[in-house]
Amino acid sequence: MRIDITDLSVEVAGKRLVHDITLRAGSGRVVGLVGPNGSGKSTLLRCVYRALRPAAGTVRLDDADLHAMDARTGARLLAALPQEAGTEFDFTVAEVVAMGRLPHQPGSGRASAADTAHCTRALARVGADHLAGRGFLSLSGGEKQRVLIARALAQDPRVLVLDEPTNHLDVAQQLAVLALVRDSGLTVLTALHDLNLAALHCDELYVLARGRLVAAGPPHDVLTPELLAEVFGVRAHRVRHPESGAVQLLFDRLTAPAADS
C-alpha cells in the first residue's frame, strides 16, 4: 500500500507550519523525513496519522482519502508511533500491546486467541516478550519504546508511521529496530534525527526546512555537503559504509571558532 501526500499544508493556532508538501512512499518502501528541529517533520506526521487535519491538500492510502475514512478502517490500515507516546495508567506490557488489536475486534472488545497470538509474536519480534507481565510504567525508556513498537506491529497494519522510533534506544537496539522495520514488508514513513541511520535504512529521504520541502531522493543523492551546510549548518564529510556501501557522514562545525589572540 502506498502513501501519497499531495500539496499538504498544516496550520496550528493560525500559524502555517507546513507548506505545500508533496511526497510518495511506495508500497513496501521505507521513506525518511529529515530536517533540523522545528522543520515540520512531526507536524507533517501528525497529519498523516490523523492527529491533525490539513489546512489544504490530501493524504491518500492507495487511492483512498485517509481523512475521509472512519476511525476503525483507518486504524486497520495504518499504525503510528508518535514521538511522545505512552500511557499514564500502569497497564501491563501485555495489555498495552493488546490495545493494538482493538481495531480488529467486535464491539465487545473481547480478545480472541488469534489476537493474543498476534500480540505474542509482536513482542517477540522486538525482543520484549520477557516483559509481558511487567507494568508499563516500571520500564526504562528503551523498553517502553520497544513495547510501543510491538503495539503498532500487533495492529497488523499495512502502513507504519513512526516519529523518531529510535528515541531512548541504545545503539544495538536502534539498529535492531530499524532492521525489523526494514524487513517488515510494510510501507514506512518515519522521521529520524540521525542522518546516518536514515542513510542506512531508508530507500528515499525527504528533507524539510522551515516547513518546506527542500530536497528529495535516494540518500546518496540527497545528503550532499552543500545541502547539509545549508539546511543543518554543518560541514559534512561523506564516506562509504564498509559493508552496505551506504553513504555515511562525519561532521564538523561549519565555521571553526576563532583562535585565541
Image: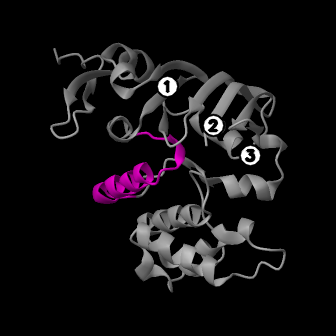
Q: In this view, does 25 lie to the left or right of 244?
A: right
Which residue is painted at 58% across and 67% down in the image?
Answer: 154
Mark 2 or 1, closer to the camera: 2
168, 122: nearer the viewer: 122
Residue 184: in magenta span: yes
Which residue is painted at 28% across and 23% down in the image?
Answer: 253
In this figure, which residue is indicated by the disc labeled 2? 3
In this figure, which residue is indicated by the disc labeled 3? 50
Which residue is painted at 38% across and 71% down in the image?
Answer: 127
Which amino acid lies under the numbered mark 2 shown in the image of this protein?
A: Ile
Instruction: Report the number of numbered marks.
Output: 3
Is 163 drawn above or below residue 137 in the view shown? above
Helix, strand or loop for disc 1: strand
181, 226: nearer the viewer: 181
Which amino acid lies under the numbered mark 1 shown in the image of this protein?
A: Val
Which amino acid lies under the numbered mark 3 shown in the image of this protein?
A: Arg
Q: How crowded is mark 2: few (under 14 residues within 10 Å), some or many (20 or more)?
A: many
193, 23: nearer the viewer: 23
Q: Position of residue 242 (x, y in %)?
A: 15, 37
**Which numbered disc flags the more N-terminal residue, 2 or 3?**
2
Circles 2 and 1: CB distance less than 8 Å? no
Magenta residues?
A: 169-193
In this figure, which residue is indicated by the disc labeled 1? 207
Is 9 drawn above or below residue 25 in the view shown? above
Q: How far apart are marks 2 and 3 (CA)?
A: 14 Å
**Quadrant housing the N terminus:** top right
Q: How crowded is mark 1: few (under 14 residues within 10 Å), some or many (20 or more)?
A: many
Q: In this view, does 99 lie to the left or right of 199?
A: right
